[in-house]
Image: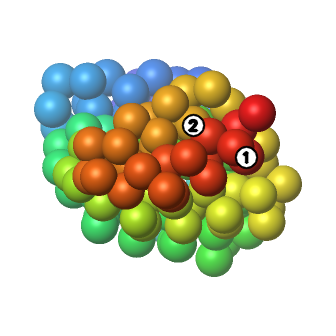
Amino acid sequence: MEKKGYQPDAITCGTLLNFLCKIGETGVAIRLLRKLEKENFELNVVLYNTVIDSLCKDRLVNDALNLLSEMMSKGIQPDLVTYNSLVQGLCNFGRGREAATLLNEMEQRKVMPDVQTFNILVDTLCKEGRLTEAKEVFRVMI
């Protein structure tokens, strides 16, 4: 694309990152993200969310959490999509306690959890036998 003189914009890059992640090429998507960063392309939360979600689905939740930290260190604030991907990723691998910590972080950052966030968390806490914590999360939800 660049060889033909076209300059990609945020939408083009987002589409390409999404495509790479959907076909299981998360590693290539990360390399593209790094290249964009090196070329001073203005990265945004949507681009990061695409890769974070894919990392979570690829069972690379620690990498996704590292990418969250990197994103925030650059002044890009996570949104509901970011947190829901991470909560789902953590819960899928029995890391409900860490997911509950993210719920607290969301509240501190004024990102309001939605029904999906609470459903994922309550379900996981119940499966982990942590019914008191599940009840507390449920109380916060209502």
Q: Which of 33 and 115 lies nearest the eye of the viewer?
A: 115
Residue 57 location, x and y as percent? Answer: 24, 39
Residue 136 visible? The answer is yes
Residue 120, picture quadrant:
top left
Position of 42 relative to 122 (above/below): below
Residue 124 location, x and y as percent? Answer: 35, 43
Position of 142 relative to 107 (above/below): above
Left or right of 29, for residue 107: right
Q: Residue at x 21, y 51 (%)?
A: 93
Quadrant occupied by the N terminus:
top left
Amino acid on which disc 2 is placed: Phe
Amino acid on which disc 1 is placed: Val
> Mark 2 — residue?
118
Q: Residue at x 67, y 65 (%)?
A: 105
> Mark 1 — residue?
140
Residue 126 location, x and y as percent? Answer: 35, 43
Q: Nearer the viewer, mark 1 or mark 2?
A: 1
Q: Which of 47 and 108 lies nearest the eye of the viewer?
A: 108
Residue 107 shows which numbered tag? Answer: none
Q: Residue at x 76, y 58 (%)?
A: 107
> Which residue ends up furthest to the right in the rendered image?
110
N-terminal of the pair, mark 1 or mark 2, is 2
Q: Which of 41 and 68 lies nearest the eye of the viewer?
A: 68
**SS of the residue under disc 2:** helix
Verify CB contact (< 8 Å) between mark 1 and mark 2: yes
Spatial separation of the CA atoms under disc 1 and disc 2: 9 Å
**Image colouring:** rainbow
Near mark 1 (Cα within 10 A), the count class, few <14, some 14-19 or many ≥20, is: few
